[in-house]
Image (cartoon, rainbow, N blue to C red):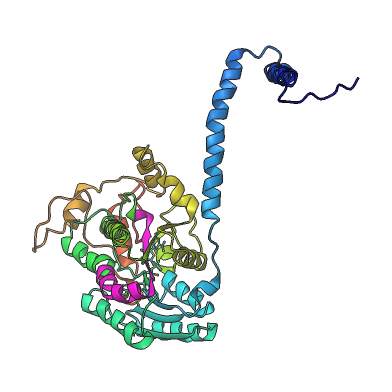
Amino acid sequence: MKRARQNPNSPAGQAEQRGANQRLLLGLSIHPPVIFQGFGSCSSSANSGMGRLQKILIPFLGLVLAFWFYSARDTFKPEMLRGKRVIVTGASTGIGEQIAYHLARMGSHILITARTEAKLQNVVQRCLELGAASARFVSGTMEDTAFAQHVVREAQTSLGGLDMLILNHVGASYFGFFDGDVEHVRKLLEINFLSYVAMTTSALPMLKESEGSIVVVSSMAGKVGFPFTVPYSATKFALDGFFSSLRQEFAIQSINVSITLCILGFIDTERAVRAAAEVLRERPAPRDECALEILKGAALRRRELYYRYSSTRLPLLLRDCAAELLDYLVRSRYRLRGPRRPPPSALSRGHRGEGGGRRAPPLPVPASPPPVRDARAAPAGTKRGPQRRLRALLAPPGRGKLIINKVY
Ligand SMILES: NC(=O)c1ccc[n+]([C@@H]2O[C@H](COP(=O)([O-])OP(=O)(O)OC[C@H]3O[C@@H](n4cnc5c(N)ncnc54)[C@H](OP(=O)(O)O)[C@@H]3O)[C@@H](O)[C@H]2O)c1
């Protein structure tokens, strides 16, 4: 039977409303057990567990959604780099060369640099074929900070300004236990670190004007301690310190120049593969994809870029909560066989302090003959000779060997 609806302001209407509210409350208190009746003997502790789970799950899902929304905010489009004026260092080969080719396809103005003029000429030629708005090179060594500044001046005169500075070059180092050679560390710091600082300093006025970007190519070895690359790791850690601090100062001073630090894993560049393929347990990632990811990160003005994510960002999550586990995982990437220490005879033969010259502090392994510093310095056909000799020193008959090579 249909009842006439009371005026909600009349006493009868208000009484009816109170009754409806009570029925609603009653309904709510009855329904949950009905809903969960399928669980049969589910006790109140199960319900409270469920409540706790909901309390964790809902904020967690919220965070995931927020992260997804934040990271999907910007999408990269190649047009972002069309017509941009870009310097790429270390572009005669490897990742730098691939960065130059991607920029060329996107129609950028490119200025590349490295030491080997013949290779740079070829890269410039290829860039023009691929559609670069313009392409040119300057050759020289980054051991000399004056040369680093000269490259930036060249951008000013030939390009009329700068939108992006990609710092990628890397000096050759050895792969093996730290050999105590302080001069080598100094030289590597000049190439891998000081020249980056010098170029940034010189380029800053132009980058401020264009509200441009600085891209610093670093490594996992610049975020966590890696064995056998002590001088190299030191230079990469230095980059993180300098550029992360500089980013803070830019924020304080409202300088709109982005800094993207690129944390790379093992990449299939010729030199890295030649050196590390037999040492590392992982497969190298493709350099052209790596180069594209670097450019995407730079164009989107990301603060850090991880490539590949699975072998860089994910392990680094352990750094603060399980540092020793991370150290162990890093060590387990290497195929180390046999004794870690050389026999005494090898030590005495290999010690840098023997046979005249300066006496270095005692080392755990022979430092001499040194592993390959620069393949170009070795006589033709003997590129891997010193590495083989060092391996032989470290491998007494029948006891396996420690693989020594050059790697990033
Ligand atoms: N490949 C990897 O597995 C890997 C992993 C992590 C990080 N990274 C980083 O990625 C970047 C590129 O690595 P890559 O593997 O592409 O290196 P690469 O193939 O060895 O190329 C190095 C580049 O730097 C130039 N260079 C070397 N010494 C120089 C000097 N004294 N002055 C000026 N230029 C110099 C080289 O050209 P010239 O010899 O003609 O001068 C070359 O163009 C580096 O910063 C490296 O640390 C690489």
Q: Residue at 65%, 14% (x, y): give it.
A: 42
Nearer to us in this view, 320 or 399: 320
Q: Position of residue 109 (x, y in %)?
A: 44, 82
Secondary structure mostly seen in magenta is: helix
Q: Which quadrant of the figure has residue 18?
A: top right
Placement of 253 over or under 348, stated as above or below: below
Q: State which quarter of the image contains the C terminus.
A: bottom left
Q: Count numbered badges in the picture.
A: 0
Image height of 149 relative to 183, above or below: below
User: Which residue lies most toward the right here?
Assistant: 1
Q: Quadrant of residue 353?
A: bottom left
User: Viewer-proximal residue, 96 or 260?
Assistant: 260
> Is 333 left or right of 50, judged from the image as shown?
left
Picture coordinates of residue 239 (x, y %)? 29, 60
Q: Which quadrant of the frame does ligand 1 lie within?
A: bottom left
Tell me residue 253's x, y (percent).
29, 62
Residue 294 drawn at (x, y percent):
45, 65
- Which region shows up in magenta? 195-221
At horizontal 71% and vertical 25% (from top left) the residue drawn is 9
Residue 384 sits above or below residue 176 on the image: below
Work out whether residue 408 can be spotted: no
Q: What residue is at 8 percent from the left and 61 percent from the top?
A: 358
Name the quadrant of the N terminus: top right
Q: As rendered, which of 400 and 118 lies closer to the eye?
A: 118
In the image, residue 345 lies in the stretch drawn in magenta: no
In this orientation, does residue 314 appear? Answer: yes
Confirm whether the magenta stretch covers residue 199: yes
